[in-house]
Image (cartoon, helix red, strand yellow):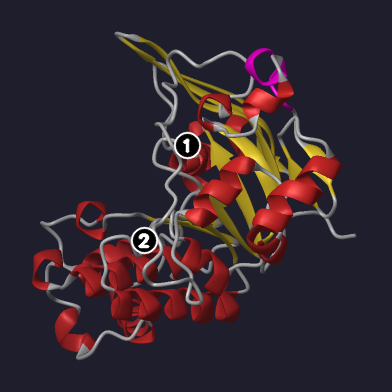
Amino acid sequence: MTEPLLSVRDLHVSFGTSEGVVQAVRGVSFDISQGETLAIVGESGSGKSVTASAIMRLNFGADVRVSGSASLDGQDILSMSEEGVRQLRGKDIAMIFQDPLTALNPFYTVGNQIAEAYAIHHPGTSKKDLRELALDSITKVGIPEPLKRLNQYPHEFSGGMRQRIVIAMALINSPKLLIADEPTTALDVTVQAQILELISAMQEAHGSAVILITHDLGVVAEVTKRVLVMYAGRLVETASVEDAFNSPTHPYTRGLLNSVRSLDSDRHSRLEPIPGNPPSLIDLPSGCPFHLRCQYAASLNDRCRSEVPELKAVGNSWSACHLTVEELSSDLRAAT
């Protein structure tokens, strides 16, 4: 087997606040191979974006504690010097942010910003070549009248067009790894489909691996083959998309699926939201972090309330749940 492009091991991220320490990411480990698309899903506050920011080294600071490793092509990003990370970021690893308006500088034209993303890593490039590269990039992402648009400012673009500009900036250096953090959240469904198709097309052209962070299970089903499910800063299930959707091995994954209406469901039926709220990351409950919202916790006596479950193999998936394989097979899978 080939070595993974990115290997994350035992990643922990915590933030010091006036109210206490926020344990945002707790022991996350995963791999992604070249050309693969991997989805990370979960409710708001589950640690998805913090995990991505840690890989990019965007959340380091005086009140932040990060431990573990995140190796890209064998180089641990978390232990690199600041200069080493600057050379890596934008060239070998790039990110599409959730809000393109705040990701773009309002005082510079989009052409200058795209050109700058390339010039930082290729300082000897002439202004003429930089402009041609920016024009080529803006054309590839499907923006009409590219020569005219090159000289416009971010506020002159729609939300979908701004997202295309951010994608052009992220891909101009043909990165090995692209992290897309909720890239379609603020877009309507038509533009959302266009952006997803664009990311897939650019991935195929550049051979990049893609980490897609989203809460939209429909997007996951459409564009990825493997999914990581996060809850309260931990991985609770890792599986192929087919297994996660058809045979979920964790009650939380099942709850997420039941919260979404499927095409074959009765249009008069009610959705089944997960009861309660995610726990505070400052004051986490003992035992399994999901046990206060889990309908199966009572049947397992005090184990769910006292013992944190580790990821274990359950069929073709990995699940952090105290339920046995037999219980999962006969109950969770039959009921989904």
The image's mark for residue 202 is: none
Identify residue for label 2. Answer: 117
Residue 104 lies in the magenta-colored region: no
Q: In the displayed structure, would residue 157 be above or below residue 96?
A: below
Give percent across and percent down for residue 127. 29, 72
- Residue in the image at 50% along x and 16% along y: 284
Neighbour class for label 1 at 10 Å: few (<14), some, many (≥20)?
many
Quarter of the figure that contains the N terminus: bottom right
Residue nearer the viewer, 49 or 101: 49
Q: In the displayed structure, would residue 201 be above or below residue 54?
A: below
Task: Residue 32: tell me if it is visible.
Answer: no
Identify residue for label 1. Answer: 46
| C-alpha span from label 1 to label 2 | 31 Å
Residue 307 lies in the magenta-colored region: yes
Residue nearer the viewer, 179 or 306: 306
- Residue in the image at 51% along x and 31% along y: 293
Give percent across and percent down for residue 95. 44, 55
- Residue in the image at 36% along x and 84% along y: 136
Quarter of the figure with residue 121: bottom left
* Pointer 1 or 2: first along the chain: 1
Give percent across and percent down for residue 276. 41, 32
Q: Secondary structure at mark 2?
A: helix
Magenta-highlighted residues: 303-309
Look at discs 1 and 2 and give the one toward the viewer. Answer: 1
Q: Secondary structure at mark 1?
A: loop
Kindly identify the amino acid type of the residue bearing the numbered disc 2: Ala
Q: In the displayed structure, would residue 141 be above or below residue 214?
A: below
Kindly identify the amino acid type of the residue bearing the numbered disc 1: Ser
Give percent across and percent down for residue 336. 63, 58
Neighbour class for label 2 at 10 Å: few (<14), some, many (≥20)?
many
Residue nearer the viewer, 237 or 226: 237
